[in-house]
Image (cartoon, helix red, strand yellow):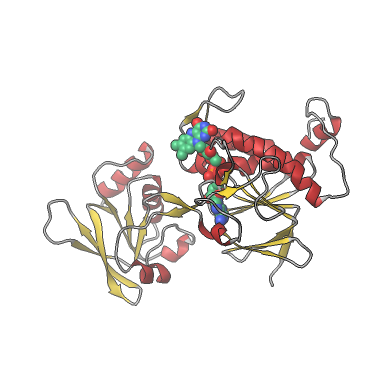
Amino acid sequence: MADIQKTDIIIIGAGPCGLFAVFELGLLDLRCHLVDILDKPGGQCAELYPEKPIYDIPALPVCTGQELTDRLMEQIAPFEPVFHYGQMAEALEKREDGSWLLTTNEGTHITAPVVVIAAGGGSFVPKRPPLTDLDAFEASGAVQYAVRQRDKLAGKRLVIAGGGDSALDWTVNLVDIAESVTLVHRRDDFRAAPDTVAKMRALVDAGRVTLHIGQLKGLEGNDGALQNVLVQQAGGDAPDALAADVLLPFYGLTMKLGPIADFGLNLEENLIPVDTERFETSEPSIFAIGDINHYPGKLKLILSGFHEAALMSHAAHGIVHPDKKIRFQYTTSSSSLQQKLGVA
Ligand SMILES: Cc1cc2nc3c(=O)[nH]c(=O)nc-3n(C[C@H](O)[C@H](O)[C@H](O)COP(=O)(O)OP(=O)(O)OC[C@H]3O[C@@H](n4cnc5c(N)ncnc54)[C@H](O)[C@@H]3O)c2cc1C
């Protein structure tokens, strides 16, 4: 097996609750690795509502989803968490010594005595266009939902579908290396940042990008090799065939529980039942905090996840260091906690 990275705690999910768990665990000298399928921290706050205001974070009368994420990242920085972004936590197995081995879809292996599932509503996965026979084109890379290797799109005829930031960012970003770029959107109105919309329109006016108003209707090609993307214009008779090597649909993300469903934990309607003293799952030393867990009276609020992170951390400490007692301390008055935070 490739290199195995060792830590005290593996956290699945870098949403607000996973991030705050790093802080509470850090105060107890527990080191964390975090895995998230997104390419950035913040979970729902950063992905679904980065610019919307949140009004119910204690002592922060208002902050946006992105500001909350940025503040949490600043707060946990002293504990130097290791992030594994863009990776799905795929398999979890118990080792002979009782520790856990987590494997991601990218082949990263991490081992720790404790796992914390902070997976929120599940992993973010791209929304697929409602087309038949997508599988073969996805498998060959002719349909891609994220640009992982920009260079591989050089010299290709690209059709980019969608009207949000991702679709327009990539339209602007790929035009210099692609043979051709056609942007397909169902109406001539875009949700992306105004500056990017303006750049895209300038490229269309200059004849460097083709804008096609219509809906994806089908794909033509053989054995995963794409030839045409069929696009239906409103009121048009037959769909237009746009010659293409790669289709990049950017229709947003949806949340699915994903591989965690196969970790062997008790589940209740895709949530993980926990106790309210330790926030431990049906499997000792696997904890669940934040939106993913369930217990009587649960409220899916960020502040609930923060509280859960604090209690979970004390329980996790007892597993990682069964022989060490925790001395309860306040950050206000404990010089040892302040040293850990780098403020003393
Ligand atoms: C529009 C909107 C407004 C909201 N407003 C408020 C508000 O005002 N106040 C409030 O308290 N709450 C609000 N919420 C709810 C709040 O965002 C959630 O309670 C919070 O995000 C839960 O945090 P979490 O860390 O548990 O999970 P999430 O934020 O969902 O993060 C979970 C992370 O885990 C990752 N993940 C899951 N499974 C895997 C896997 N197998 N491998 C890798 N990564 C994985 C996901 O990609 C995700 O990044 C709002 C929610 C929405 C959608």
Query: In the rendered image, is residue 183 in sight?
Result: yes
Q: For the image shown, how many numbered marks are present on the structure?
A: 0
For residue 13, side relative to residue 5 (left or right): left
Residue 86 shows in this picture: no
Please provide percent x and percent y for residue 338.
80, 32
**Residue occupying image coordinates x 55% and y 35%:** 301
Please give left or right for residue 308 compared with residue 291 in the image. Answer: right
- Vertical order, 140 against 161 (above or below): below
State which quadrant residue 179 falls in: bottom left
Q: Looking at the picture, how far across and down is residue 241, in whole percent?
A: 21, 64
Q: Nearer the viewer, residue 45 or 339?
A: 45
Above-or-below relation of 200 to 263: above
Please state if 19 lies on the left or on the right of 67 as rendered.
Answer: right
Residue located at (88% from left, 49% from top): 323
Horizontal and vertical percent position of residue 285? 72, 53
Query: Where is the N terminus found, in terms of image quarters?
Result: bottom right
Residue at image point 38% right, 39% down: 193
Q: Residue at x 37, y 69 (%)?
A: 135
